[in-house]
Amino acid sequence: MIKARMWLWYALITTLSWGVWGALIEIPEKAGFPATLGYVAWALTMIPCSMVALHLDKWKLATHPRAAIFGSLVGFFGAGGQLILFQALRDGPAYVVFPLISLFPVVTIFLSTLFLKEKASKRQWIGISFSLAAIFFLSYQPPSDTVSNDQLWLLLSIGVFILWGFQAFIMKFSNDLMSAESIFFYMMATSVLLIPVAIWMTDLSQPINWGFEGPYLAGFIHALNAFGALTLVYALRYGKAIIVVPMTGLSPIITVILSLVLYAVIPGTMLIIGMTLAAVAIYILSE
């Protein structure tokens, strides 16, 4: 019984880790440490997480070609999507970009039902539907940005939506090819390989905070993201992608609650609706 519910515990840990990460990530950015360099900090924190995971698996790294190819695809789709997102947010309005990409579980659900033949009960489909609705509301940003006449940001946002949807699908598919620890190793390796791209995207002519509130604090905070990514791989080892991915997408509910405590941010109507839907979704999917 406990083993059968392992996916739920790992999914909840991912949701909690990413939720806390989301509430804290703006601290180094507001202190003058660019988000692109935050990516560098995140990629580096993936290394110790990967080493610990491989150690627990007795260093059994899958090295056959299919493992390397699909494991690297998981990493490139996830990390590459993050870098594309930075560019989309430079020109596009956050209130359109975030809700759009937040619905990437739709892609994962479609691919998993079509190719992996995953099925869910009527109750679970209701929970999945509540999750998708909650993710949209929780990711909503009030209109405050000036929309660029260049629509490239929209194409980039759609690209992230597709990449992240495929990433979760391939992550689940890859569990039949290698261990979760090996999948995460390739995720780490490809994320590190993209560090030069993140540095190239950084405006180094602007002042950068190299003190504790910069790279060091960013490293501690991004470690939560890396740890959540690791537990997501484990969640997909034991659970269905069509259930795990929408549930972990509910991490903003933790972000909202923590932001309320730390920053006295009062949630608006959209967030309250999202939080309510998320609570219902978690209850339904965890039964």
Image (spheres, rainbow, N blue to C red):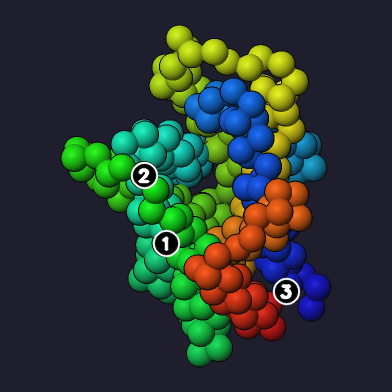
The answer to which of marks 2 and 3 sits earlier in the sequence is 3
Residue type highlighted by circle 2: Asp
Question: Circle 1: is it few (<14), some (14-19), or many (20+) Cα within 10 Å?
Answer: many
Give the number of the disc on residue 261. none
> Nearer the N terminus, badge 1 or badge 2?
1
Q: Quadrant of the N terminus?
A: bottom right
Q: Is residue 75 visible?
A: yes
* Residue under numbered circle 2: 145
In the picture, measured across the screen, residue 111 lies left or right of residue 257, that is left
SS class, disc 3: helix
Q: Residue at x 47, y 78 (%)?
A: 129
Residue 272, how many percent across, how many down? Answer: 58, 71
Q: List the single residue furthest toward the top.
A: 205
Q: In terms of secondary structure, where does tag 1 sit?
A: loop
- 208 w.r.t. 109: above or below: above
Mark 3 is surrounded, within 10 Å at the Cα level, by few (under 14), some (14 to 19) or many (20 or more) other residues, namely few
User: Relative to 156, is 36 above or below?
Assistant: above
Q: Position of residue 199 (x, y in %)?
A: 48, 18
Residue found 59% across the figure and 23% down from its top: 32
| Numbered label attached to residue 103 | 1
Q: Which kind of residue does numbered mark 3 sit on?
A: Ala
Disc 3: which residue: 4
**Relative to 78, 6 lies left or right:** right
